[in-house]
């Protein structure tokens, strides 16, 4: 019985002194002398931590946030704000090389205190790509051309990774422009321009209507017969209305010399 208790106790101690590498992570052993072993610990493995420790690195869908950039546009105006997110993965077999051989400043840290391999490095690379890409576009079309800008920034980052021989270790899967705010002065000017254009169009319509009315009056004045015909038609309509009892009152000019006979109801 005592042997069973001892075995169980030892088993519990062994389990309490182990850590498991979760899916989407890779681990590296740090020995008691603070040296880091080069062989990666795969997801799903249990690793003892009674002696030394295990570093865990997320390797899937890591975000590198790039905020508060102020790139210039093709008009040489400075954007008020420009933010984006870089989404990338780390090749599991490259984790030890990146952690051991790259500067610690290249790596970030998540809320759980786990190192995020090459996060700070990618933030810098993305920032440089933004300052090369945005100057090709107009300030007011940044948001319209957002998908194309994201594609160009992605291409610029991949080109830098290729030049540094890191494309096999780091795969950037997506660039998301979160915020792109043009200068307020440019926005105000654009709104004023649109307003002025609309007012100009309205004025042109009014001028066209006035021209058409002037032509109509000129045509009538040039054709006295048409005026007389229209007057005769109006008198005929009045006469028909009176005859049918639909008109009880009419207005006549002061010099009217004719005769009006309005039947009683």
Image (tube, grey):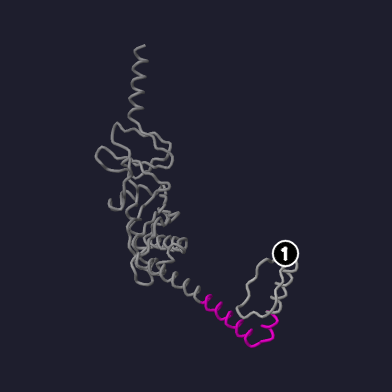
* Magenta stretch prevailing secondary structure: helix
State the image coordinates of residue 94 (x, y, percent, origin top left): 39, 49
> Looking at the picture, does residue 84 appear above or below residue 228?
above
Count the numbered circles shown. 1
Q: Quadrant of the C terminus?
A: bottom right
> Foreground: 265 or 29?
265
User: Which residue does the image show at 35% across and 49% down from the upper left?
Assistant: 117
Q: Which residue is tagged 1?
A: 264
Residue 225 magenta-highlighted: yes
What range is drawn magenta here? 204-230
- Find the residue positioned furthest to the top: 1
User: Which residue does the image show at 48% across and 71% down from the upper left?
Assistant: 198
> Foreground: 72 or 186?
186
State the image coordinates of residue 9 (x, y, percent, origin top left): 34, 20
State the image coordinates of residue 107 (x, y, percent, origin top left): 31, 50
Q: Would you call the spot at circle 1 few (<14 residues within 10 Å), some (14-19), or many (20 or more)?
A: few
- Find the residue positioned furthest to the left: 33
User: Which residue does the image show at 33% across and 17% down from the upper left?
Assistant: 6
- Find the residue positioned furthest to the bottom: 222
152 lies left or right of 114: right
196 lies left or right of 214: left
> Looking at the picture, does residue 95 appear above or below residue 14?
below
Task: Classify residue 132 by image quadrant.
Answer: bottom left
Q: Quadrant of the N terminus?
A: top left
Task: Classify residue 168 by image quadrant.
Answer: bottom left
State the image coordinates of residue 172 (x, y, percent, origin top left): 43, 55
Element class at badge 1: loop
> Looking at the picture, does residue 104 appear above or below residue 113?
below
User: Which residue does the image show at 55% across and 79% down from the upper left?
Assistant: 210
Residue 104 magenta-highlighted: no
> Foreground: 214 or 77?
214
């Amino acid at each position: 019985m005592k042997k069973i208790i001892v075995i169980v106790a030892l088993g519990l101690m062994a389990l309490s002194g182990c850590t498991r590498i979760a899916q989407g992570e890779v681990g590296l052993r740090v020995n008691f002398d603070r040296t880091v072993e080069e062989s990666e610990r795969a997801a799903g493995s249990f690793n003892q931590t009674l002696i030394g420790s295990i570093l865990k690195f997320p390797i899937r869908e890591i975000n590198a946030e790039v905020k508060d950039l102020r790139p210039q546009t093709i008009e040489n105006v400075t954007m008020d704000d420009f933010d984006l997110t870089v989404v990338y993965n780390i090749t599991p077999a490259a984790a030890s090389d990146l952690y051991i051989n790259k500067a610690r400043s290249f790596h970030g840290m998540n809320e759980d205190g786990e190192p995020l391999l090459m996060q700070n490095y990618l933030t810098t690379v993305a920032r440089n790509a933004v300052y090369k890409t945005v100057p090709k576009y107009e300030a007011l079309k940044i948001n319209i051309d957002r998908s194309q800008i994201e594609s160009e920034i992605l291409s610029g980052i991949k080109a830098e990774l290729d030049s540094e021989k890191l494309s096999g270790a780091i795969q950037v899967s997506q660039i998301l422009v979160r915020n792109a705010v043009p200068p307020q002065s440019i926005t105000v000017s654009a709104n004023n321009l649109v307003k002025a254009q609309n007012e100009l169009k309205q004025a042109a319509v009014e001028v066209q209507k006035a021209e058409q009315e002037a032509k109509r009056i000129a045509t009538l004045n040039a054709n006295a017969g048409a005026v007389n015909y229209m007057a005769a038609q109006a008198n005929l309509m009045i006469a028909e209305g009176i005859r049918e009892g639909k008109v009880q009152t009419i207005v006549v000019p002061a010099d009217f010399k004719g005769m009006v006979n309005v039947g009683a109801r």
